[in-house]
Image: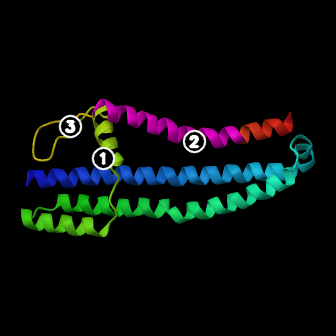
């Protein structure tokens, strides 16, 4: 029973990380689209000033507007918020399952039934759980049914930091920097 309980607990915690990941994707997409919209708006307010610096600016502006529209449709299709909500529903059901005493076979059946109804998490979510429990919370998880602590390998640690840096740089620093440069170039 302990191994099953541990597996359900780990899956629940991993789904929490999946939810957080999709919510961060949703926020980043929102920020990027709004930043690009702001840059396009600023560019359309000052077409002569920018047109004197960039030949063919009006055509570039129209092309970027169409591209922004297409990007917004593509991002909408990813449905990051809905995926986050589905992962949340899953981990709440798993937590509810853990809290109720029942025979092993019944718990295993309910666990399988829950898992069939929801999307799977990515391997990286599990690796993030391992990393964060060990290095951030200083409370490593144990292999299901044992007392063997799961310690992240060096590659998991490196990939964790590289992924975070790339995500933060691309999704937050790039749009904010683009907007700041656009404003400064128009003011200066």
**Which numbered circle lies on residue 44?**
none
Mark 2 or mark 1, which has the lower sequence index?
A: 1
In the displayed structure, 27 sits above or below 119; it is above
Asked whether residue 53 is drawn in magenta, I would say: no
**Which numbered circle lies on residue 150?**
3
Q: In which quarter of the image is the N terminus?
A: bottom left
- Label 2 residue SS: helix
- Label 1 residue SS: helix
Disc 2 crowd, CA 10 A, few/some/many (<14, 14-19, 20+): some
Q: In this view, does 176 lie to the left or right of 126?
A: right
- Residue linked to disc 2: 170
Is residue 136 something that shows in the picture? no
- Give how far apart the Cα atoms at labels 3 and 2 are: 31 Å
**Which numbered circle lies on residue 126?**
1
Q: How many marks?
A: 3
Asked whether residue 175 is drawn in magenta, I would say: yes
- Label 3 residue SS: loop
Task: State the extent of the magenta-drawn residues as a range.
Answer: 153-178
């Amino acid at each position: 029973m302990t191994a099953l309980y541990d597996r359900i607990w780990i899956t629940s915690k991993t789904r929490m990380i999946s939810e957080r990941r999709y919510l961060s994707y949703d926020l980043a997409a929102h920020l990027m689209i709004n930043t690009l919209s702001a840059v396009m708006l600023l560019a359309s307010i000052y077409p002569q000033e920018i047109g004197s610096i960039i030949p063919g600016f009006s055509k570039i502006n129209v092309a970027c507007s169409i591209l922004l529209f297409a990007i917004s449709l593509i991002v909408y299709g990813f449905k990051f918020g809905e995926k986050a909500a589905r992962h949340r529903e899953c981990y709440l059901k798993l937590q509810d399952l853990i809290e109720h005493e029942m025979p092993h076979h019944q718990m295993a059946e309910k666990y399988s039934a829950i898992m069939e109804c929801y999307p799977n998490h990515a391997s990286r979510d599990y690796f993030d759980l391992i990393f964060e429990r060990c290095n951030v919370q200083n409370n490593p998880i144990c292999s299901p049914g044992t007392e063997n602590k799961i310690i992240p390998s060096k590659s998991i640690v490196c990939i964790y930091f590289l992924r975070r840096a790339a995500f933060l740089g691309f999704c937050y620093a790039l749009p904010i920097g683009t907007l700041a440069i656009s404003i400064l170039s128009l003011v200066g």
